[in-house]
Image (spheres, coloured by chain):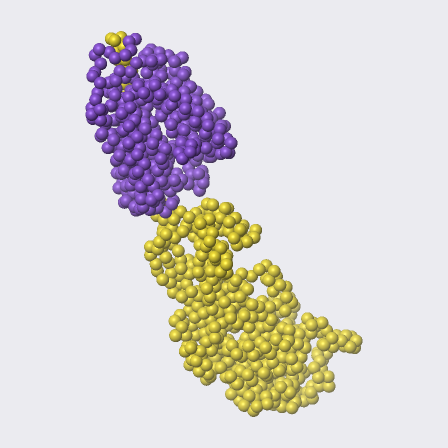
Chain colours: A yellow, B purple
Amino acid sequence: MKHFRKGDGERSGLFTRRALLLGGAQAVLLTALAGRLYQLQVVETDRFSSLAEENRVSMRLLPPSRGLIFDRGGVPLAVNRNNFRAMAASDRGRGADVLVERLDQILNLGDTEKVRLLRELRRSRNAQPIVVRENLGWEEVARLEFNAPDLPGVFIDLGQSRDYPEGDLMSHIVGYTGRVADEDLAGRDDPVLQLATMRFGKKGVERSLEDDLRGRAGAVQVEVNAVGRVVRELDRTEGQPGANALLTIDLDIQRFAAEKIKEHQSGSVVVLDVITGDVIAMVSTPGFDPSTFARGITQAEWRDLLDDPQRPLHNKAIAGVYPPGSTYKMVTALAALEAKVIDPWTRLPCLGFLELGKIKFHCWLKGGHGSTNVSEAIAMSCDCYFYEVARRAGVDRVSDMAQRLGFGKLSELGLPGESAANQPTRTWKQEKIGKAWQHGDTFNLGIGQGYMTATPLQLAIMTARLANGGYEVQPNLLLAKATPREELVPPAPRTRPTAPSLRLNPQHLAVIRQGMSDVVNTSHGTANALRAKQPEFTYAGKTGTAQVKRITEREREMGITQASLPWHLRHHALFVCYGPVDNPRYACAVIVEHGQAGGATAGPIGRDVLIETMKRDPSRRTDRFRKMASR
Amino acid sequence: MGSGPSLDAPAPVGFAEKIWRINWGLVLVLTAIAGVGVLALYSAAGGRFEPWAARHAVRYGSALMLMLVVALVHPKVWLALAWPIYIVSVLLLVAVDVIGKIGMGAQRWLVLGPIQIQPSEIAKVAVILVIARYYHGLRREQAGQFLYTLPPLAMILVVVGLVMVQPDLGTAMMVLMGGGALLFVAGVRIWMFLAAGVGAVACLPIAWSLMHDYQKRRVLTFLDPDRDPLGAGYHITQSKIATGSGGMFGKGFLKGTQSSLNFLPEKQTDFIFTTFVEEWGMAGALVLLGLFALVVVWGFSIAFRSQHHFGRLLALGVTAMLFLYMFINTAMVMGMLPVVGVPLPLVSNGGTALLSVMFACGLLIGVNVYRDAQLPRTR
C-alpha cells in the first residue's frame, strides 16, 4: 500500500508541476486575448467605430422632380410620369454574378446588359443602388416581387421619367433627356447628377434650361443592412422641385405650320414676334419621337434616325444652313441706302445680265426688267439691280449691314446646336479660302448666293428687325419660369420693342418694306398670287430660291430642268414675310429643302402660317392661358 | 499491487454527501456563461427569443440535468467504459466519413432515426477518457518512456485523422491540442514534444497539400486578411469592426449594428462572441473571459484534489478542452487565428456541442464527487 501511495505521489507531483506549467500557458493565452480586446476596443476603437458607421449609414439623394414645360397657352409639352424601375444594390459586388444571372432569368436582360450590370454593381460604392431596368410593366414588377427572397439587394423604385405628349411636333424645341454623361458634369458639382436614375437635358429646351428644370436634390440618411436593403430612415431633407417653364411657342400655330410643311418632304418654318422676339412657332421636319429617347433608344432606332437623308434629328430651323438667295436682297438694298450710294429714287437699268470682265451675271428674267428703283427691284427681285448696288456699296458695307440684321452669328436663343451659318467678308475669304475677295464675289453676295449662308432663324430675325423699325430683337423661347405652378404666368403683353435700336434711317426702312409689300400686293410683285384675301391680314414678303446645283448652259440645252433633277440636287425654296403690313407684329421664314422655287412651294406655307398667326394673335392674348391654368 | 478496498479507505460517501460535493459554484458559473449565451442569442435575433435564445435556454436546462446525472456516476464506470466509448466513436467517425464520401461533400452528421449525432463531439470526450484511462494504468517511469507514448499518440492521431477528413479542421486541431496537453501533464518527456513540434513544421508542406481549397484560403486569409477583403477576409474584417466599434463599454444591449444589420456572418454560432462584445464592450468581454477563467481554475483545483490519477487526467483533459474551445473561438473572431469553425462553448447556438461540453463538465464534477475513490490500476 505504501508503495502504491508512493508511486501515486510521484505521479501526482509530476502531474502538479506539469499542470501548473499548462495553467501558466493558459494564463498567457488568456492575457493575449485580453490584450487583443484592448487593442481592438480601446486603441483602435475610433477607427472601427467609423468603419461600422460607414457600413451602417448610407446617404441617399432624393432626385428632385423635374420641372414641366408648357406652351404659351399652358398645354403640357414635357411631363413626368411614374416609372417603376428595378434597382439593385450589392455590397461591393459580392454575389453580383449570381444576382445578375437570376435577374436575367426574370427580365431577359441579354448579354450586353448583363455585362453593364456586373460592371456597375462592382463599381458602386456604399451599396449605392444602380438601375437594372426602367419602365417596368406590371407583370415584370410582380415577377420581381414574387422572387424577392432570391434577389437580395433588388428592389422596385418608383421614380419619374419624362414623357412628351406632343411627340415629334415639339421634338426639336423641347428636346429630350438622357443619362448623365461625363461631359454634362463639367462645371456642375451638383451631387444629384451622380445618381444612376438622374436624367440630364440633351437637346432643345431640356438642355438649355437644364439648370432651371433640374431642381435641388433632397437627401435621406438611411440605415442599410449588409445587402444594401434599407432598414429604416434616420434623417430626411426635402429637395426642391425644378422650375416649370412656359414657352413662347403657340402649340396651335406650331401644329398648323407643321401640317403645312409636312406636305413637302423636308423643311423648316420659324415664326417670330417682331416686338418681343418670342418664337411663336419653330418647325423642322421631319422630327422624331423624343419618347424613344426617354425610354432608352435602341441601337437600331438610333441608326435609322442618323441614316435618314432628311436628317430628322437635325433642327433645320437653327442648324440648317442655306444660301438665302433673293431673301437677302433687302440687306443689300439697305446697306446701299444707308451708305448713300443710292437713294430711294435711284433707277438702274436691267438688260437681263451684267458683265464683269468676261463673265456674264444673269438676271433670272431673261429679257431683263428695264429701269427700276429700289422698291421695284425688290418687288420684281431684279438680280441686275442688286449686282450693281452691291458693287457700289462694297462687300464690307453689305456684310456689316447683314451682321447688324443677325446674319453670321449665333442668336441669343440658347438652344444647343444652333449654327452661325456664314456671312462672308474679305478677311473671312482670305483666311478660309486663301484667296482675295473678287468683284464677282460681291455680285453673288448681293443676291444672297456664293459663300453666303443663313439659317431659317436668321432669316426670320432679319425680317423681324426690318419689320419692327430696326430694333435688334433677339429670339426668345422662354416666356416665364417658376417653381410653383400658380406663379407660372405669362408677362403682360408688350407693344413696343425693348431691344436696342439699330439706328437705321426710318425712310430707308420704309422703302425696303414698301418693296416687300409690293412683292405680294402689286401685280408686278413676284408673289402677287399669294396676296391675302382679307384686307386685315395684308402682309409683305420676299421669295427666294437657293441654288444647290448650277444647271449649265449645256444641260439647259439638253432639256434638264429643276423638276427633272434628283430631289437632293433641286433648289431650296425660301420665303420670308411679316404682317400685318401697316403695323407689323409677326415675321415668318420658310425653307422647303429642294422645293425648287420660293414662290411656288415656300410661299403658300409662309402666307398660310403668317395669316393663321395674325388671326390667332398669340402675343396680344393671354386669356387662353388663364383658362388653361385655372382648370 | 493490491486491488480492492483498502483498510484505510474512507467510508463510502452517501447520496447527500455526493450532492453536497457537486461544485455548485461551478454549476453557477456555467449557468452564467449559458445566460450570456441566451442574452447574445436574443440580441442576435433582433431582440427576439425565437429562433435561438429560447431553444438555447431549454437545451441548457436539459444539458444541465445530463451533467448532474453524469457527475453522480462513479469514475470506475467511466474507467470501464473508456475503451468501448472510444471504439464506438471511432466507428461512428468512419461511418460519417464513408457516408460523406458517398454523399459527396462535407459530412459531420449522422442521422440515427430522430436524432442527429455529430461523432466528432463524442470523439473529443472519448479521447480524453481513453488517454486518462491509459495513463492511469501506467507507472510514473513508464509514462516517461518513448514506447509507452506511442499508443496514446495513435489514439489521438486516429481521431484527428478521421476528423480532418470530414473535413473539420477546428475540431481536429482541438483534439490534437487537447490530447497533447493531456500527454504533457501525464508526464511525457519534454523532448518528445519538441521533436513533435519540429516534425510538425517539417510536415507542414504535406499538410498544406492535403488541405481543401477553402481551408487553404482561410489560412492565407488569416495570414493576410487584406488579401481578399471582399471574399474570405470579409468575415474577419467585419468581426473586427464589430468588436472594435464596441469600445470599452459597448453600444448597449440590442444596439449592436454590425450583427443586427447582418454584416456579421454566422452571428448565432461561431461569431456569437462578436455579437456579444459589440453590445457589451471590453467590460462585457472581460467578464465573459473571467467566467471561463473561473471554470478553468475550478477544473485545475478539482484535478489537484483528485486522489486518483484517472480523475486528475480526466479533470485536466476536460478543462483543457473547454479552454481550447474558448480560446480558439475568441482568438478566431478577433483575427488572431484562422477561421476554423469552432463554437464558443455554452454560448453559441447548437445542441450537440452544448451536450458534449456539459457531458464533459459532468465528468469533471464527477471527479470531485468521487475524488477519494480508490481506483485499481488496471491494465
Q: Nearer the viewer, residue B135 or A542?
A: B135
Quarter holding the C terminus of chain A is: bottom left
Q: Nearer the viewer, residue A573 or A166?
A: A166
Q: Where's residue A197, x and y in %?
A: 46, 58
- Can residue A347 be seen by looking at this rendering? no
> Count the marks: how many?
0
Q: Is residue B106 left or right of residue B124?
A: right
Image quarter for residue A531?
Answer: bottom right
Q: In the displayed structure, would residue B374 be above or below residue B172?
A: above
Q: Is residue B224 left or right of residue B41?
A: right
Kindly identify the residue that appears in the image at 40 percent across and 73 percent down. Answer: A485
Q: Where's residue B136, x and y in %?
A: 32, 16
Q: Is residue A314 left or right of residue B118?
A: right
Kindly identify the residue that appears in the image at 55 percent across and 64 percent down. Answer: A292
Q: Nearer the viewer, residue A569 or A294?
A: A294
Image quarter for residue B38?
Answer: top left
Q: Where's residue B204, x and y in %?
A: 46, 25
Q: Residue furthest right?
A: A558
- Can residue B350 be seen by looking at this rendering? yes
Kindly identify the residue that appears in the image at 32 percent across and 25 percent down. Answer: B318
Quarter holding the N terminus of chain A is: top left
Kindly identify the residue that appears in the image at 71 percent across and 72 percent down. Answer: A566
Image quarter for residue A557?
Answer: bottom right
Q: In the displayed structure, would residue A547 be above or below residue B236?
A: below
Q: Is residue B15 left or right of residue B267?
A: left
Q: Where's residue B78, x and y in %?
A: 33, 21
